[in-house]
Image: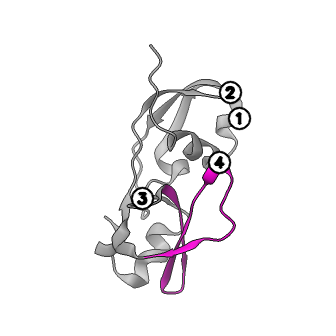
Amino acid sequence: MNPCDALQQDWRMYYDGSWMNHRRYGPGQVSVQDTDMFFYRYPDDKVDSNPTRVDPADLLCWWPRSGAYNTPGGAVYIARKATRSMRKSAHAGEHYVVRWGKVFMRSTSTTLMLQLRKGHSLVE
C-alpha cells in the first residue's frame, strides 16, 4: 500500500522510518511529522541533513530484488523473509536478511538499504 492510499492518521504507523521510492529522488527514508511527510536522501551514502517535504502521491513502496550484490566490502547475498507486521513498506530489519557476507552489513539496517539502493550487481 502506497502512502496516498492510506489514511493520513495511519502514516506514522505504516511509514515512519521506512524506505520508499520517490518518483524524482529515488530510494530514501521517510519521516512522518504530524500531517507531513519528509524524505531523506542519501547522496554519497551520507544522510541529507535537510529533509525535503514531499507529496505522498510521489512515494511508492520500494522492494529491492533479493540476490547477490557486489559491495565495496565484498559480496553479500540479501534474502527476503516473510514477516507479519503493521509496517507495509520496505523496512530493512523486518523484510531483509543477509545470508552471507561481511559483518558490517549486519550492523544497521541503514547500511543494508544503502547498499541495496545502488542497484543489483549479480555475482556470477
Disc 4 marks a residue whose amino acid type is: Asp
Q: Position of residue 45 (x, y in %)?
A: 65, 48
Disc 1 marks a residue whose amino acid type is: Phe
Q: Is residue 23 above or below residue 102?
A: below
Sequence-wise first label, 3 or 1: 3
Sequence-wise first label, 1 or 4: 4
Q: CA distance from mark 3 to mark 4?
A: 23 Å
Residue picked out by circle 2 = 73
Find the magenta span and give its range. Answer: 27-54
Q: CA distance from mark 2 to mark 4?
A: 16 Å
Sequence-wise first label, 2 or 4: 4
Is 87 included in the stretch rendered in magenta?
no
Between 39 and 24, the one nearer to me in the picture: 24
Q: CA distance from mark 3 to mark 1?
A: 23 Å
Q: Which mark is residue 44?
A: 4
Residue picked out by circle 3 = 89
Q: Position of residue 39 (x, y in %)?
A: 53, 68
Q: CA distance from mark 2 to mark 3?
A: 27 Å
Q: Secondary structure at mark 3?
A: loop
